Image: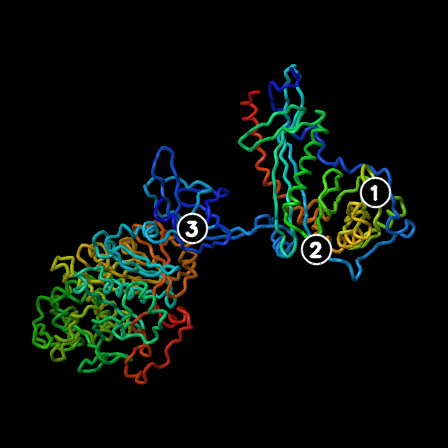
Amino acid sequence: MNPRQVAGLAIEGWSPEYGTPVEGDPDEAPAAHVDAGAEVPEDEWRPLGPGPDTWVPGCVDFVDGVRRIEARIWITGADGDARLGICASYAAGVVRCDRRADIRAVDVGRGFFGLAPVPDLVTRAGNFAGCPVSEDDIQQLVNGLQERMGQLEVKVAGAGGPVGSEALIILDGPLRGGQRIPGAIGYVKSHRVQYLAAAPRAVVASLAPGQRSPVFLLQTKWTRFSWYMRLSEAAGHPWAGIVRCEAWSESGLERVRKLADATAAALPKFASEPHKDDRAPQNLYPIAGLERELRRRLGDRGMVLRALQRAVAGFRP
Amino acid sequence: MSEHSSSPPIGRVIGTDPATPLEFWVAVSEGCFLQLDDVLVLERKLPGRGEPVRIYGMVADLRARHEGARFDSDVFLIEDGVLPAQVTEAARVLATRFEPEVFVAPVPGEVVRKATGEARDQALFFDGMKRKVPVGLSRDGEIVHANIEFIDGTRGAHVNISGISGVATKTSYAVFLLHSLFTSGQLGEAAVNTKALIFNVKGEDLLFLDRANRNLDGEQQARYTALGLPAQPFTSVELWAPPRPGDPSAAPRTGSRSDGVTSFFWTLEEFCRDELLPFLFADADDERQQYTIVVHNVTAKLRREARPVGDGGVRVGGVTCRTFEQLIEVISDRVEGEEGDWAGRAIGGGTVNAFVRRLHAARKDVQHLVRGDVPNPGKHRLDFQAQLAVVDIAKLSRRAQRFVVGVVLRRTFQHKEDTGAREPLLFVVLDELNKYAPREGRSPIKEILLDIAERGRSLGVILIGAQQTASEVERRIIANSSLRVVGRLDSAEAGRPEYAFLPPAHRQRATISKPGTMILSQPELPVPLVLEFPFPAWATRPDEAAGAESAGDGDGPGVGSGSSVADLFEGLGE
């Protein structure tokens, strides 16, 4: 008999967030290799502004996902060992901004993450589908959750409807190797990792709103193009108001240059104001609006927790 | 399901605001709209009961907002296509009826439909009204009914109308009500003998009720058709006006209307016999004065001692009186003179003086109304034959107005009392009730109006009273009115407790009501109804009177179909 065969479930009394990495994206790993001279030789780096022939997209799709750990659950195995699992809700959606900003597709998923064989947990608040992960430490559980959310993002990005070549697709967060949304641009708000040497960094710091840095090549587990741009004149340190974008390397440098120019031209108008968003200006208005809507769709946290408690209390293996 | 299932769903009960049995909010589905006063219906299934409870209601308020916006300035971001948000519309619904009467709250999520046809009649209790009179059109062009049983005295009586002069169209609405009562056929056979008495207190608005209004365009005629009423003037009308002061032949004092007007006055004989003297002292504060005892003593003496001498004159104590002046000279002699004992015992000289002073002050006001100097006074006697009698008191002084109203009301009420039968009904339309029955003080007229308000229901005397401010009118008169109607109200007035029958939203609406729009509350409906009534089919001014001598050229400057109702009502007065 499998010693992990589920014998019982119990909800951890402590708050679900306790001990979980709240922020931090597992995919934003330090780069092994950076080629700053992909577009312009490194010693010729200068701020690049949109030119007269810059493509300004008429339609921008923003794709984003949210996740919430609803409860930490102790799974008692047949051997009497208790192993950690989490029940989490996640949602992804697309907001399309052409003349109006419309939320196009929203999907909500709920999962029960733990070591295989993890059962489905059917509650009044929905079915928490069993999602096996390889290790039962909290980081791996959250990685599993992040992966499901990424899959949902790919799904809704496709469901948003055909975009054609006239649309720019912005994915909140860095690109992830395993989950590809064709043509999407990764949008990274924070700068925890330094990719550039001192001289190019000075160029980034000198960017004016609507200007971008030259495109550079970034290689971790996979390869992508990246560039920095400034959304707005923000007070504080020199990198305030700077965001980093990523594009798939197989798009080709020419296409990526066009996309980079397009982001520099299109994104500043979506930048938020500090009094409306505490992550201003990087947290773009459409994404903030989408996130609010997605969190709303996750349902009331207290209701979900109660539903889980009820389901766990009534759980029979 | 039932007949209302045919109308498509228009929204759902929302759960973000509490739904109560009396009030709930309905989110409007995309592509639909609701407006104020729309009538809605929804069903709720109850556990253990086969038949669902049907809940009817009426839209009292509407709100639209951006969901997803947190700041006022977000509207610009949303319109620029930067911030995603959704426009949502919700309607506040006041429940009117539960069928069967299980007062449960509607459940959030229930489908709501517009109530049309039979469902609408049920929602507004029209289905239970055996005899109903059309009292106006709702905003969506449907007929609004009132239960006649609450007008004709069967279960209730009297109508009270409040509103600012000039924009509230109070008198116009009162006349429209009469038109509807007379021509809708709902009074049955009694309609032929039913009469109405209107006092024209201002201008000449009511002196052309028998003339068609040539400003009545096709659109307004269609509204009469929609109400099932003929767009025609009153057919049986008599007009009474006071005599011209100083004219020995007592020709009627009229303005632009000269034909078909009869002058009215009382003979000295009637004045003495019918005890009309107290109506000269009809000021509210008179009752508190000492001299009223003198008034009553003199009244009694006049009744006993005055002898008719023909043509309305009287002979009192050997003196023949043909004019009011002569009569008050005789009275003065009798109360002040050496041998005079009319004032009564132990009456002080000051009190007698006060009486005489008042009596002389009244002379100028009423000497043309009380006289014995015109041959054949019988034809000037207010004796209502036609269905609708208009008594013009607009050009009289305040004291004379009180005298006429008081005497006429007492006589008609007494007449009904004597016959003792409720039918035929008599409707009395009186504006400026606050003048005749003020909240403070007592007066003979107020007593009569109170009598009508409290006993008129069983005697078939129906008061259609109107005033600018209900807060200044005797409470019992308002309280006895089954139908309460409100036109445009001053916002300070709208906040007074007299209008507590209006829900807050209706109070607010009363302050912006346009001419021709009224809010009507009737006993069976928990919610007042906002209604519009059509432009008068009868003339309200000389230049509107079709076929009048001034309008020899045919159609004349009629009002084009493009002008709005509000324009038509303009200048109509109240």
Q: Secondary structure at mark 2?
A: loop
Find residue B476 and report its horizontal and vertical position in percent: 27, 54
Q: CA distance from mark 2 to mark 3?
A: 40 Å
Please state which of residues B520 and B310 is positioned toward the viewer in this rendering: B520
* Residue type, mark 2 in image: Glu
Q: Secondary structure at mark 1?
A: strand
Q: Are marks 2 and 1 on the same chain?
A: yes
Q: Give the image quarter of residue A278.
A: top right
Q: Residues within 10 Å of mark 1 (few under 14, many from 20)?
A: many
Residue B294 seen in the figure? no
Q: Is residue B58 left or right of residue A179?
A: left
Q: Which mark is residue B8?
A: 3
B130 vs A144: above or below? below
Give the quadrant of the C terminus of chain B: bottom left
* Residues at discs 2 and 1 in contact (Cβ within 8 Å): no
Q: Chain of mark 3?
A: B
Write down the quadrant of residue B362 in the picture: bottom left
B228 or A232, nearer to the observer: B228
Subunit under mark 2: A
The quarter of the rendered structure image containing the N terminus of chain B is top left
Image side of residue B37 versus residue A134, left or right: left
Tag nearer the camera, 2 or 1: 2
- The residue shown at (53%, 50%) is B88
Circle 2 packing at 10 Å, graded few (<14), some (14-19), many (20+), is few
- Which residue is identified by label 2? A166
Q: Residue furthest bottom?
A: B553
Nearer the observer, A23 or A168: A168
Residue at image coords 86%, 51%: A39
Q: CA distance from mark 1 to mark 3?
A: 58 Å
Q: Position of residue A205 (x, y in %)?
A: 84, 49
Q: Chain of mark 1?
A: A
Mark 1 = which residue?
Answer: A218
